[in-house]
Image (cartoon, grey):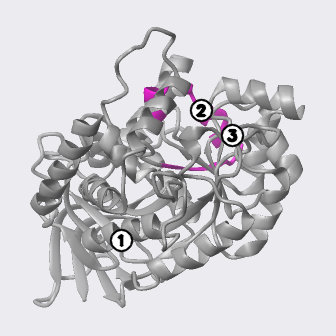
């Protein structure tokens, strides 16, 4: 197929009348300044490379809004976690598929075209594995197939409750595997995604709290070509526990234990000292930032300004899925830096568009974290792209940098009109064709779950 784009963001900059030739889901040629032919699919407005979502827990879409009541004690990430444990106690694979499908429709309508799903909800309600140990992962894969979202599935290894191999707690019983059961989980997870186009399997030690240090090298050796993701340094209590129990800050401990490289994505990495920040940047690893969730949970502010100045790579994820919109994640990332430093346009170079800098960096970092050939409109990469509605009030009369800056910084949400994943159109006119059916299934699941709560 051939797409003719009125205007597109290419690696070289914005270009008009761009002709993309797509074969087997991959861009084979890009021709700016080309006349449209009668066989082309013509797309007006501004076309962007699709944004990879590098971190999500899809089931948490169902608990959005349920943790906003302050309890008798100080509210924090740790009290939010208790609400999360109570919510997931009731989920079965059909529930997870319904919740994931809703989240995935919203991701596609919000400008995300690929996902790295950090998947740790594995077992039945009593903590015993399902007959198919990857039944929950298969539910995630089914939701991706239904909606057309590109998927990197990250089965999570979770063994312990805290640093020093402390026992896991009751609320974590559905997460826990030993090495033998985790190997079975990997094999079954690979089978669950095998039929999906261009799907990828990665691995994820949940956090330094939840695995033994020697698990890191063991995991890295299981799939030498796959992405590796880990939660790290999200909360100050985590940093304090790491120092008290292990004698090192979390990212320093991670860097001492395993050689970080381009395969690694460090989720949150919020609380870093200068040496830790520079170690991530020089390693080629990606910092996986989730600004909306990090704000919601009171995590803190990632030092994006100094990390970027050190050459660090980053991407964004929707994490807890309380709000799913690529533009909103980028806007809050930039605004958090402005809040802290009391200056503007901090994530861009001098005399450059902030929106373009954010989109390009997050698309490239997200693609790397997903372990897939994505993130730009260029030959050899998957034909994942998003077009913005030129008639949206935020974009009227604007093109190029001004249009993208406006889409991110003055729209309530990214004004997405068309979305293509692997050359297949999955959103038209801002709407996913399965939206109504997915919502109806979600409604039944949510009424059941809320009645049980």
Mark nearer the viewer, 3 or 2 = 3
Would residue 371 appear left or right of 409 to someone viewing this image?
right
Left or right, residue 133 beside residue 253: left
Q: Is residue 310 left or right of residue 102?
A: right
**Residue 249: quadrant of the picture:** top right
Mark 1–mark 3 distance (CA, rounded to whole Å): 39 Å
Which residue position is annotated with label 2? Answer: 302
Quadrant of residue 274 within the rendered picture: top right
Q: Of helix, strand and loop, which one carries label 3?
A: loop
The answer to whether mark 3 and mark 2 are in CB contact below 8 A is no
Image height of 275 relative to 179, above or below: above
| Residue span colored magenta | 293-316
Q: Does dot 2 land on a helix, a strand or a loop?
A: loop
Rendered position, 271 above or below 187: above
Res 274 visible: yes
In the image, 212: left or right of 13? right
Q: Which mark is residue 161?
A: 3
x and y percent of residue 138 in the render?
42, 71
Q: Are marks 2 and 1 in contact (CB under 8 Å)?
A: no
Number of callouts:
3
Graded by Cα atoms within 10 Å as few (under 14), some (14 to 19) or many (20 or more), the crowding at tag 1 reads many
Q: CA distance from mark 3 to mark 2?
A: 25 Å
- Look at the picture and state if 73 lies above or below 107: above
Query: Is residue 374 covered in magenta?
Result: no
The local secondary structure at tag 1 comes to: loop
From the image, tell me which residue sits under label 1: 384
Say whether residue 373 is visible. no
């Amino acid at each position: 197929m051939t797409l003719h784009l009125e205007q597109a963001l290419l690696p070289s900059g914005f270009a008009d009348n761009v002709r993309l030739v797509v074969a087997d889901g991959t861009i084979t040629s890009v021709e700016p300044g080309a006349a449209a032919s009668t066989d082309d699919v013509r797309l007006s407005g501004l076309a962007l490379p699709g944004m990879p979502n590098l971190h999500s827990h899809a089931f948490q879409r169902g608990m959005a809004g349920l943790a906003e009541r302050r309890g008798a004690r100080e509210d924090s990430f740790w009290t939010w976690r208790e609400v999360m444990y109570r919510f997931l106690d009731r989920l079965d694979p059909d529930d997870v598929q319904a919740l994931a499908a809703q989240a995935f429709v919203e991701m596609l309508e919000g400008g995300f075209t690929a996902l790295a799903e950090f998947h740790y909800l594995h077992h039945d309600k009593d903590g015993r594995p399902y007959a198919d140990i990857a039944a929950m992962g298969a539910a995630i894969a089914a939701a991706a197939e239904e909606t057309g979202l590109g998927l990197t599935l990250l089965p999570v290894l979770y063994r312990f409750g805290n640093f020093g191999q402390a026992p896991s707690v009751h609320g974590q019983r559905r997460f826990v595997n030993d090495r033998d059961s985790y190997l079975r989980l990997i094999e079954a997870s690979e089978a669950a995604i095998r039929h999906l186009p261009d799907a990828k399997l990665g691995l994820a030690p949940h956090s330094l709290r939840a695995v033994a240090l020697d698990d890191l090298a063991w995991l890295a050796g299981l799939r030498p070509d796959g992405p590796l993701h880990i939660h790290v340094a999200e909360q100050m209590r985590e940093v304090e526990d790491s120092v008290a129990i292990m004698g090192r800050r979390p990212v320093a401990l991670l860097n001492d234990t395993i050689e970080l490289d381009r395969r690694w994505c460090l989720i949150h990495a919020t609380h870093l000292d200068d040496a830790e920040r520079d170690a991530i940047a020089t390693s080629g690893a990606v910092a996986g930032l989730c600004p909306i969730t990090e704000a919601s949970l009171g995590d803190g502010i990632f030092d994006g300004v100094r990390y970027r100045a050190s050459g660090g790579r980053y991407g964004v994820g929707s994490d807890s899925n309380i709000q799913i919109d690529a533009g909103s994640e980028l806007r809050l990332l930039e605004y958090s830096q402005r809040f802290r430093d009391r200056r503007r346009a901090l994530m861009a170079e001098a005399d450059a568009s902030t929106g373009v800098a954010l989109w390009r960096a997050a698309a490239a970092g997200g693609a790397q974290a997903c372990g897939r050939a994505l993130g730009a409109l260029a030959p050899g990469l998957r034909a994942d792209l998003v077009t913005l509605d030129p008639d949206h009030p935020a974009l009227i009369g604007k093109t190029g940098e001004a249009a993208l800056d406006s889409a991110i910084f003055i729209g309530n949400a990214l004004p997405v009109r068309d979305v293509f994943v692997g050359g297949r159109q999955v959103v038209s006119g801002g709407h996913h064709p399965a939206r109504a059916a997915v919502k109806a299934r979600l409604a039944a699941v949510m009424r059941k779950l809320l009645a049980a709560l």
